[in-house]
Amino acid sequence: MDLFNSALGRNITFVRPSHFIIRGFIGISNVKYYYVFLFTVFIISVLGNVFVMLLILLDHNLQTPKYIAVFSLAVSDLLNSCALVPKLLDIFLFNHNLISYSDCLTFLFFCYVCLSMEALNLVALAYDRLIAIVSPLHYHIRITHKVMSGLIAFFWTFVILVVLIATGLLTRLSFCDSVVIKSYFCDHGQLYKLGCNDTSPNRIIALLLILVILCLYPILIFWLPLAFILFSYLYIAVTLAKVATVREGLKAFKTCIGHLLLVSIYFIPLLIVFTLMGKIHPNARIINLSMTSVFPSMLNPIIYVLQTQEIKDSVKRLLQITRKSRIAVRQKAVKM
């Protein structure tokens, strides 16, 4: 983080507290039941995403460009669950709500990277569906392992750099008043509100840069991905209406149901919070956002297992292989 200090001005003293206090879920009745629910979600999320990752790695039939994006989605979901939920439970269930300055920024970095990749993985899958339905004859030319791997690698690099810059710019803030973060984790927006910088020229530049990040980040990571996904499905619907019968159109659109469910689960709660930002109770906002952070990670592997035919076929093959292996072991044991 010293890079940001040297780049934006030398010999500046910043007030950095030894710790922050995270104070989400205050005054909510029976909140411990919610923590039990979060723990259950965490276990299912870890098991489900590990299962999907192993399935893709072990079954060569799933090692296609589309499943590079599905694998990346499972990785980001797994990392998100492991980065957020254990710490969240530690903070609120065991009252360890003090978090050091450096740990808070690290916590923020990993949470935002994983949550951002959730949206961009959905963009990659939307692009895959768009080409598969609108231009099926060119699908294997335009959606290759190289193209999808490059797209996913670009998304990961882009997100890491953007979040790293946003996190680094927070080190340009002084915290000379409150250190209480009214959220369920080290929220970038909440940390920014706690800043109390003076009006010296260097710090004005720093605050302007932070404001740019605050404005650009939601656009780059939320609004643009959502706009692309909506546009892609609108284009798919228009194309199918022109060239396909109703039966063919429904059959083609059925391949998008799983992805549409993932998009709805991720974006709709965020849209509600952003739209009703000042009209909902702070506790309702915190619970909504926390659910948005952990719920998709649990549901994504379940939806793909239940809605995607390739995954279901792969599970059947895996079960058949397991069954044959057990029969072979039993036969061998009988002969001995």
Image (spheres, helix red, strand yellow):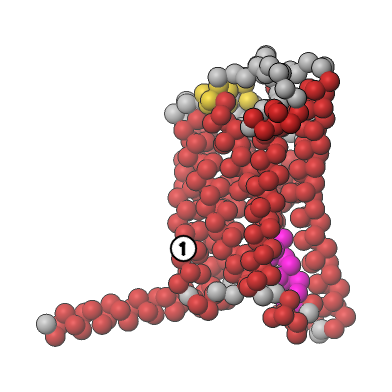
Residue 336, compared with residue 3, is above or below; it is below
Q: Is residue 71 left or right of residue 44?
A: right
Is residue 283 in sight in this rendering? no
Q: Read off the magenta span.
A: 123-133
- Furthest toward the top, the residue is 177
Number of numbered discs: 1
Q: Is residue 228 left or right of residue 301?
A: right
Q: Quadrant of the C terminus?
A: bottom left
Tell me the quarter of the image containing the N terminus: top right
As for residue 126 lying within the magenta part, the answer is yes
Against 245, is 157 above or below? Answer: above
Q: Residue at x 81, y 56 (%)?
A: 227
- Density class for disc 1 (Cα within 10 Å; few <14, some 14-19, many ≥20) is some
Name the residue carrying label 1: 51
Query: Taking 298 as reference, is 327 above or below it?
Result: below
Q: Describe residue 277's horizontal placement relative to residue 180 as left or right.
A: right
